Amino acid sequence: MTEAGRGADAKDGGRRGRGRRAAPKRAWGRRTQESDREAGPEPGTTPDGPAYEPEATMQLRVGEIRPDETMQLKIVALDGTRPGPEPAPAAADEPGDARRSGVLAPLLTVLAVLRRLLAPVTAKLAPYAELAAPYVRKLRPEYPRPGREGWRRWMPSWRQWLAGWLATAGVTGLFLTVAYAATDVPTNLNSYATQQDNVYFWSDGTPMARTGWVRRQAMPLKDIPEGVRWAVLAAENESFYSDPGISGKGITRALWRTVGQGTTEGGSTITQQYVKNVYLNQDQNLGRKLTEAMIALKLDNRMSKDKILEGYLNTSWFGRGTYGIQRASQAYYGKDVSKLNPSEAAMLASLLKGAGLYDPTLSAANHRRAVERWSWILDRMVKIGKLSPAERAKYTEFPEPIKTLQIYDTGKQSDYLVELASQYARKNAHLSDKEFDLGGYQIYTTFDRKRESELTDAVTKAREAALKKDPKAARTAHYGAASVATDGRIVAVYGGPDHRKQGYNESNATTVPAGSAFTPFVYAAGLEHGVHKTREGPATPVTPESVYDGDDAVPVTTPEGPYWDRSGRKVAAHNDGKRSYGPISLRQALARSVNTPFMQLGMDTGLERVKSTAQAAGLLPSSFGPATPALSLGTSTPSTIRMASGYATFAADGRHTEPYSVRRVTRNGAGVRLDAPDRRRAVSPQVARQVSEALGDNFRASHPTPAATTPAAGKDGTTEKDTALWYTGTLESVSTAIVVYRIDLGKSLEPLPLDGLAGTRENSVPYGIWSQAVGVG
């Protein structure tokens, strides 16, 4: 550098760096080394140094650099002169100075700090930079190329091509590295993509119903045959177990189609498709494809190939409203995926290319495409060694799927069953509504298909007969029924004619008084706890042979005298038909449905003990009304499920099991913890047998013909003003309760008289339904 140049640097306030010691110069372009060594100016030079030709370019001077010096970039104007000294700084009061001090000052400070921090590094790199300078000069782009003529001047040299390719590769690699580091695998799955339907099964394990917005049921990979897996892999991604989760060739082709031709194309591996299914949306754009590829790379490093394949098979769309290979197998072939052969699996695998184009039942063109792809997939399985040629030779005929979709969906009665089972499963498996609605649960119910059909048929016939007899009265008639086993299983219910029209479940409704069907619980309480003739005295034992007054309108007494109601009248009990029976044993009173002894027995035993005994046997506390003498004649309002459960307790030797409708719950094959139903001792075995014997007497007295061959036990139940009629009977360890009542749901909601719709006492409609449902002649 000349003295004039140093002076200009010093005058510039040091913005060009500290004063540099002159160093040997290596000229680029058209300058020669000899001109660099000239001490004085020559023609064509300036006071600051040699002149440059107009086509000279930006030049990088590389020389000896001291530790406290930096490399400087000298810029030469295109008119052949060096830029002159920069103008002196503006006065402090000029706007430019204010802008520089307010905006550029922090930036200049940062640059100064970086310069000091990088000075040792640049000093160490200086020798290497000097060695690399000749090679860098050779790579310097001279464009248009000198020494070439015509179109060759505009063709880059191989060095320029190499430099461009390396630069592109470097920038691309840097971009992908940053993108990979910045992309995280989402923690929240696409809820729709992972949502499944819930499947309900009968007690024999056959499907009963499916619920949910999405028809999907996930299956563990171990339950999916290997032939099915490889049919999918052969069709979609045969290198799945060896690739890194993405396909460079496929991505390039997809990008070319998306950018170059304005259309979209997949080109995705199974890992990428799985990522799209469960983490992303279905948008076709470059941003989504890049994110998909980055997540796929990370997922391939974090998750096993088998887990990725399992997820893919359970979230892919197969058409016919189905997601997942299990639901597809059921929709197209009516069987579980575990029973598919390779030929059927190949047909299902073809649907992954587009169910709308490859479902063979939709059109002739679809059928032709499906056959071609099915054959290609099988051949592909042979090629990759996953199907032997001998086995391939077996599959020459296209496996035609079923034409209509076989869906076990909810129907008129199964809606009520699903309602009961879903409520029980949520409560006893401790599942939130959100968890349950995401689906994937298999609910194995206690409902017996045969008993359910027989009970429904019996009620339906009774309903139809009532409509023929008195259409006006029958429109307000309601029928509820339930069968509960002695171990607590709810084996059948009748909830109503159609859940879509009547949203509540008659079998679980708690609106109808039990009437005289409640008296067995009063009898059990008296036998279990005894009676108190004085307020403070000890309990006196009661036996089935204990005698009470069976006359009609007998006043109810307490240890202090008659029981008075709030209006000042004595409370008296009445028998059905106001018949009087005189002195009668408790066993005979229950066998002959005499009410008055049990109202007095309830007072003698204690109404609270009566309530606790009935509750222990299965009735809910919420169904009980006030503790008045009428409690003993059935003011409580149990559902038919609870009434059947209470009678089942007596048949189970006094041990009560809470009624339950679900015996097992799994999710995608894995067991879900389900609380076991409560079991408790309600009454002693002796008391339970004594109650059952009296109920057996009642069945034999009321229905002597079937009783001759049927060891059943049961009792009817009437209510005040004849607004409801019950029959509850036990046969073969299953208790079934039937109730018929009238109520106008559109008006007053008050009970209405049955007006003959319940039949006679000897041949009542509830008993007729019960006998037909349980097969009693």
Image: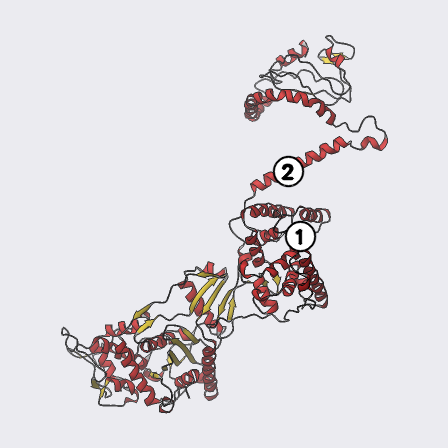
Placement of the N terminus among the 4 image quadrants: top right
Task: Indicate the amino acid at tag 2.
Answer: Gly
User: Is 41 drawn above or below residue 533 in the view shown?
Assistant: above
Which image quadrant for residue 154? top right
Q: Which residue is mark 2?
A: 173
Residue 422 percent location from the top left of the image? 45, 66
Point out residue 109 in the picture as x, y percentages from the top left corner. Answer: 54, 23
Residue at the limit of the structure toward the right, as seen here: 150
* Crowd around label 2: few <14 · some 14–19 · many ≥20 (10 Å): few
Image coords of residue 399 (percent x, y): 66, 68
Report helix, strand or loop for mark 1: loop
Mark nearer the N terminus (2 vs 1): 2
Is the residue 467 above or below the residue 54 in the image?
Answer: below
> Residue 186 vs residue 560: left or right?
right
* Residue with the mark numbered 1: 266
Q: Quadrant of residue 177?
A: top right
Q: Residue at x 21, y 75 (%)?
A: 529
Pick the residue in front: 407 or 595: 407
Instruction: Work out how far the residue at label 2 is from the one at label 1, CA to CA, in angstroms.
Output: 23 Å
Q: Is residue 69 above or below residue 201?
A: above
- Residue neighbourhood size for the residue with mark 1, other residues' Cα within 10 Å, grouped as few (<14), some (14–19), many (≥20): some
Residue 310: quarter of image: bottom right
Secondary structure of the residue carrying tag 2 is helix
Q: Quadrant of the C terminus?
A: bottom left
Amino acid at the residue labelled 1 = Gly
Residue drawn at the location 75% of the way across and 33% of the way down: 161
Depth check: give the residue in front, 86 or 259.
259
Front position in the image: 454 or 345: 345
